[in-house]
Each structure stands twice: as structure tokens, then as C-alpha cells.
Amino acid sequence: MWFNVSFVSNSGRKKNLLFYKTDEQGIGMKVYRAVSIAIEILVLYVKMTVTWLYCLYQFFVPPEPKSVKGEVILITGAGHGMGREVAMRFGRLGGIIVCVDINAVGNQETVDIIKKDKGRAHRFECDVTNREAVIALKDKISREVGDVTMLVNNAGIMPCKPLSMTTESAIRGAFEVNIIAHFWLLQTFLPSMMEKNHGHIVAMSSMAGVVGLRNLVPYCATKFAVRGLMEALHEELREDAKDYSGIKLTVICPFIVDTGLCKHPKIKFPSLMKILTPQEAADNIVDAVRRNYYEITIPSSLYYINMICRIFPRSVPLYLKDFLDSGLEAQ
């Protein structure tokens, strides 16, 4: 590196001298940065490889199911269908079930079934789309039962018409129940889980939240949103300076479940993609929660089929979708 040095001689004349100096410090910093990045990349590679091998191991040797005994488990939409079935199973496992539904009759039936099966259950009616009502619900549950440690956001509705024929109220209703209610429930019940670094959030998405389907545009939009909400929430908890590793998240993506919402299902190959019973779906949901799985599809084969299809250009898997020809007819 060349540089000038100016000085004044004894005679009063200004003189310039030209020197060359090697920037050893600059080169050293560049080498240090390069080595540091190389080490970081090596560590990243090792971490990713070890994690991949561990996940592969868990695929063949699933983790042992955790106990839910004594957990206070709030389930929305508990008055019928999958919500009822999930509530019954958690009740048999020793959970304290908080059944929440807007339908008092169905909700009470679920509570009666759990109690008849020697389980513990409590009934609360609430419109989960109403933020103030959800906050009041939390206060009441805290007084009468205790802090909620597991939240199952199961309540949902399914308008099934072409978008051009779907009313404004139907679209707003789908978003209010299927996704906006999740925010109110999370904002209300998650803080106590964060204080204790203990809890589990379960969100009901759908295969309609993985693959777009005709006659279900608003429904698909809400179920895609559920998956986005849970992914972002996972990162928010994971990247926080505090330790929230004790809070687990599970996203459920069932195929068509015979809960009464799907009025006109269309299945070309029933033996390959059969309509699920609420009992079958609930068995899978409870198992996934107890093993702390982050996301499952029901049946599980659809998860891997979707992953494989995603590596192809978008137009390619559409042929497979057309061949399977499954979905819902307009109501």
C-alpha cells in the first residue's frame, strides 16, 4: 500500500516522501472472517445433518406419548364431531376437559359423556369470535377450574359454494370463526403458558389449508391462514430471549371428515382417499399431540405426497390432482 508523508526540513522547505506498506492487519481480518464463516457453515451442516438423522430415527421409532393427566385442556367446538371425540379421549387419559361451544345442548352432552366415563369435564358457552367474551371466559375458567395448559382451537365452519355465489356474511363468518377466533384465544390463554413455560397449542387446519380446492375458496383461505399463524407463532416463541421450549405447537390437517360440514363430498377412489370418521380423526389428533408432532395430515400419506409434489413445477402435480378428482360439490 503506497502513501505520502509530508514534512518541513530545517531549511524551511516542504518535502514529500512516498512509502509502501503492506496492510497486514486488513489481510488478517479478511482471513479471520473467512475462517469464521467457514466454521459457521461447517457447524450448520453438522447441526442440520444430525437433526435430519434424528428425525429419520423418530420416523421409524416415534417418541413415547406424553401424559396429559391433570392438564387443563380447553377444546372449542366440543359440542359435536371431532371436538367431542377429542374431548372424550383426553378425558379418558386423565385430562381436565374444558368444553367450549356456542351450542349449550351439544356441549352438555359432551360433558355428560366424559363424566359417565369417569372423566372430569366442565361446560362453558362462548362465542369465540367475540374478544370480550373470550376474556370473560378466561376469568371464569381460572376461578372455577384453573389455568388452561392445553388449547385446542377446533371450532370451524365451512361455506361450500363457488366464490361468486358466496355471500359477504358467509365469507366474514368463515374468517371470524376459523382464524380470527384463534387470535383472541391465543392472546387470552397463551400468556399464562408463557409464564410457566408449559403448555400446548393445537390448531385445526385442513388439507384444504395445504391444497386449494374449488367451492371452498374462503374456507381454504382461512385454513392456509391457520398454518401461517402457527408457523409465525412458533418462530416468535423460538426466537424470544426467554426460554419457551416448554410450549409445544401442533397443526392438524385432516382430509374430509364426516362431521356434517361436508355435505356433498366427491371421492373417485374411496379405498385410497376415504372419508374419515370423527373417531379416526380424533385418534390421530390425540396421538400427534401426545408425541409433540408439529404438523400432521390425516391420513399421514397425504403429507409425503404433498411434499413430493411441491418439488415439481406447479403445473405437473395438477395432473395428479385431476386424476384423483376429489373434493366437495357446491351445496
Image (tube, rainbow, N blue to C red):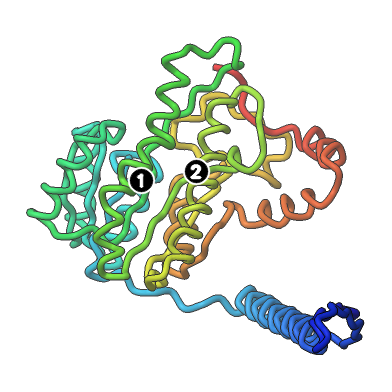
Q: What label sits on residue 226 in the rendered view?
A: 2
Q: Residue at x 53, y 47 (%)?
A: 227
Q: Amino acid at mark 1?
A: Gly
Where residue 142 appears, as percent x and y from the top left, is 13, 55
SS at mark 2 in the image: helix
Residue that carries the numbered disc 1 in the rendered image: 83
Q: Which residue is more in the foreground, 59 or 92?
A: 59
Where residue 148 appears, as percent x and y from the top left, is 23, 58
Q: Residue at x 67, y 39 (%)?
A: 211
- Above or below — where is 255 with respect to 4? above
Q: Mark 2 or mark 1, which has the lower sequence index? A: 1
Q: Is residue 143 left or right of residue 279?
A: left
Q: Is residue 266 left or right of residue 289?
A: right
Q: Is residue 114 left or right of residue 268?
A: left
Q: Residue at x 19, y 37 (%)?
A: 125
Where residue 55 appears, as percent x and y from the top left, is 63, 75
Q: Where is the C terminus found, in terms of image quarters?
A: top right
**Residue at far left of view:** 143
- Above or below — where is 265 with respect to 99? above
